[in-house]
Amino acid sequence: QVQLVESGGGLVKPGGSLRLSCAASGFTFSDYYMSWIRQAPGKGLEWVSYISSSGSTIYYADSVKGRFTISRDNAKNSLYLQMNSLRAEDTAVYYCARVVGASDYWGQGTLVTVSS
Amino acid sequence: DIQMTQSPSTLSASVGDRVTITCRASQSISSWLAWYQQKPGKAPKLLIYKASSLESGVPSRFSGSGSGTEFTLTISSLQPDDFATYYCQQYNSYRNFGPGTKVDIK
């Protein structure tokens, strides 16, 4: 069965960096676009970024452009999100999701807290 | 950027009620719209894709309609498991979400 498991969240100071990972299993990872979506505490869903199956096409939300970098390693069935210059407003649960147009499978999320 | 709005933001209903949620896009997105259900502490669950296609395993009381800029999600007879927050998402250009509609118990 399809599984997506995020890791790498935690507490980081403003201006710091963090790298999230998403381990995929149960499907042919290299065939699918993948996405990161986040949800601040008590708030709605915010799309962050997505990457094509080969990694050649990447898009970011304006709120993270220039600070976050999405990448993937198809040999390791893994998706990544490098987050730099973190701000308090980046505090959220970060989900990875498989993209089939819409997002049909989601991980359980990993919490990122940006605070001094 | 395409902006998404939803109405109402909160909806109070009873078991057995017919419930309708509206989602509007700031420009035409054809039928590239999805609906998700989210319960507290859980990841969202895909209900509807391409505006009106029911995701496998989703009960048939859920239905979607619309195209262009106006879309609706209808729950024909609200069940106890349906009290949750519902989000629309456009995937015509990038992947923006609506602000959500919370369905709670009347």
Image: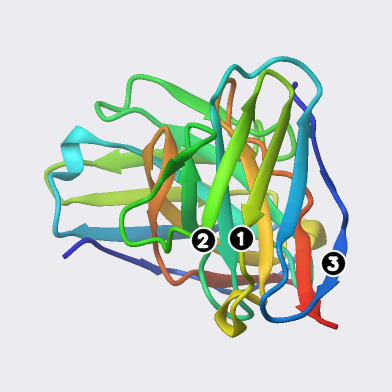
Residue on which the image places disc 2: B61
Chain containing the residue with disc 3: B
Question: Horizontally, is A107 left or right of A59 in the view?
Answer: left
Label whose residue precedes the other's in the sequence (2 or 1): 2
Which quarter of the picture shows residue A68? top right
Q: Give x and y (percent) for residue B94.
A: 58, 27
Where disc 1 sits, the SS reads loop
Where is residue A112 shown, x and y percent of the image?
A: 61, 69
> Does residue B87 sit above or below B27 in this rendering?
below
Foreground of the two, B87 or B106: B106
Disc 3 residue type (three-letter): Leu
Q: Residues within 10 Å of mark 3 (few under 14, many from 20)?
A: some
State how many labels appear: 3
Return the residue at label 1: B76
Residue B57 in percent (x, y) is at 32, 62
Give the mark, 1 or 3, whose residue is nearer the N terminus: 3
Mark 2 touches mark 1? (CB < 8 Å): yes
Calculate the distance from the C-alpha at mark 2 to the C-alpha at mark 1. Answer: 5 Å
Marks 2/1 same chain: yes
Please state, as top left, top right, bottom left or bottom right, where the N terminus of chain A lies in the image.
bottom left
**Please, what secondary structure does the residue beneath circle 3 have?**
strand
- Label 1: few (<14), some or many (≥20) within 10 Å? some
Identify residue for label 3: B11
At mark 2, the secondary structure is: loop
Instruction: State the separation of the CA atoms marked 3 and 2.
Output: 17 Å
Is A32 on the left-hand or right-hand side of A9?
left
